[in-house]
Image (tube, rainbow, N blue to C red):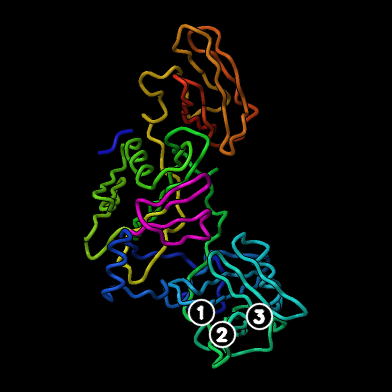
Amino acid sequence: MALSIKFFKNLHPETLKTHNTMMKPTFSLWAALIFSGGISLKAQTAFPEVKFWVGTGSDSSVLVIDFKDGTWDSCYAWGFLHNGPATGEEMLNAVAAADINFSVNIAGGFLMDIQYGSHSGVGGTNNFYWSTWSGTGLGNLTMNMGIGTQVAHGEWFACSFTDFNPALPPGPSIPAFNPSQFTPQDVQFWVGSGPDSTLLVIDFLDGNTPSSYAWGFLHNGPVTAEQMLQAVDAADPQLSIAMAAGFLNDISYMNHNGIGGTGGLYWGTWSATNLGNWDMNMGLSTPLGNGDFFGCSFMNFNPVIRPGYPVPAAVPSAALSAAEGTQYRLYPNPAQDGVWIENLTTHPARFSIVDLSGRTCLEGLLVNQGPEWVSLQNLSTGTYFLTWQEDNHLKTQILLKQ
């Protein structure tokens, strides 16, 4: 116990439901499985279950991009909403405007380059160029006349990076994730102290809803993933993480259990800077800096699956109370109009209330020992931190404003 599309045709996006299956071991086990032939690096699903829709309108189409770069995740899909026929160029530009991980270079009506996360398709590299395809599904795509080709409701437009010897259509796709679906502003349970912040996402991929949860970790300078997991494990009484000899073995949280080896499933680890650019990493030794994401997902590696959209891990009531020996106590927490902040020392003490971006929203000096009322009426609903200096260290306590 811890202490401290499918086939997509003529469907509106609201009818498409997300589905997760299972995920990855630590790096050493991952490498061993690859070299022994025990893992198939194929796409998560035969057809994409669209999770990131851009544009507006009553018609819906799918954009598929396949970099053909030999990676497990070379091909991605986005959904596009529109009114009436739309061109491939309009789809590409709409996705580029909505997805911070995606960029496209179009010149003179020709598709030159596409970048997405760690994937890059620069026209002319090794005599590879972008080919364009359209149809009513991945199974019947045919080459078209380029990005000026129009698509109607229920149709697909696809791009494939190829040397045209022969020109290859896109393969099975995985859904692109919306990088804004979950951000640090959505985290409720923060652990640690310091000016740097990292998000931890744990997805049990067990078919329950939800199966994926997120915590925040505050630190001062680089830390390792193992240090973060230890800190979150110590802070959340509902979470239990077992690590040994640099390996992530087991994680339990509420009614979820991921025991390494059960049914051939193991924990995989991932790095990102937002939900849209997960990439597999080296495991518990991975260094973490300010703004990073670290993910864990429980799977059999056949297929490989990223952590899905998380929900914020709940803050236990005990975590909202001041830790023993600290200089402050605040209540009620969560708070609405205001909060009582109690100075537990015999001398004046200065505090700050800081938002998730590090901006100081309120600050004050508690002159007298005992509680003083601090109004929160000018603060928006969300997660804040009460910070103060104690023994030459910055201390932090969560404050939730409802």
User: Is 399 placed above or below 245 here?
Assistant: above
Kindly identify the amino acid type of the residue bearing the numbered disc 1: Lys
Q: Position of residue 235 (x, y in %)?
A: 35, 35
Q: Which mark is residue 152?
A: 3
Q: Which corner quadrant of the image does residue 90 belong to?
A: bottom right
Dot 3 lies on which element?
loop
Judged by depth in the image, the label closer to the viewer, 3 or 1, is 1
Which residue shows up at 28% across the image and 38% down it?
2
Q: Position of residue 383 (x, y in %)?
A: 53, 36
The disc, 3 or 1, on the residue closer to the chain's N-terminal end is 1
Kindly identify the amino acid type of the residue bearing the numbered disc 3: Ala
Closest to the observer, 188 or 230: 230
- In the rendered structure, the answer to whether residue 3 lies left or right of residue 314 reads left
Q: Which residues are magenta?
A: 268-294
For the residues labelled 3 and 2, say whether their Cβ atoms are less than 8 Å apart. Answer: no
The disc, 1 or 2, on the residue closer to the chain's N-terminal end is 1
- In the rendered structure, the answer to whether residue 123 lies left or right of residue 77 reads right
Quarter of the picture containing the C terminus is top right
- In the rendered structure, the answer to whether residue 272 lies left or right of residue 226 reads right
Q: Which mark is residue 68?
A: 1
Mark 1 Cα shell of 10 Å, populated few (<14), some (14-19), many (≥20):
many
- Which residue appears farthest toward the left when viewing the image? 262
Q: What distance separates the C-alpha of mark 1 from that of mark 2?
A: 7 Å
Q: Position of residue 363 (x, y in %)?
A: 60, 22
Dot 2 lies on which element?
strand
Q: Which corner quadrant of the image does residue 113 belong to?
A: bottom right
Q: Which mark is residue 162?
A: 2
Mark 3 Cα shell of 10 Å, populated few (<14), some (14-19), many (≥20):
some
Dot 1 lies on which element?
loop
Q: Which corner quadrant of the image does residue 26 belong to?
A: bottom left
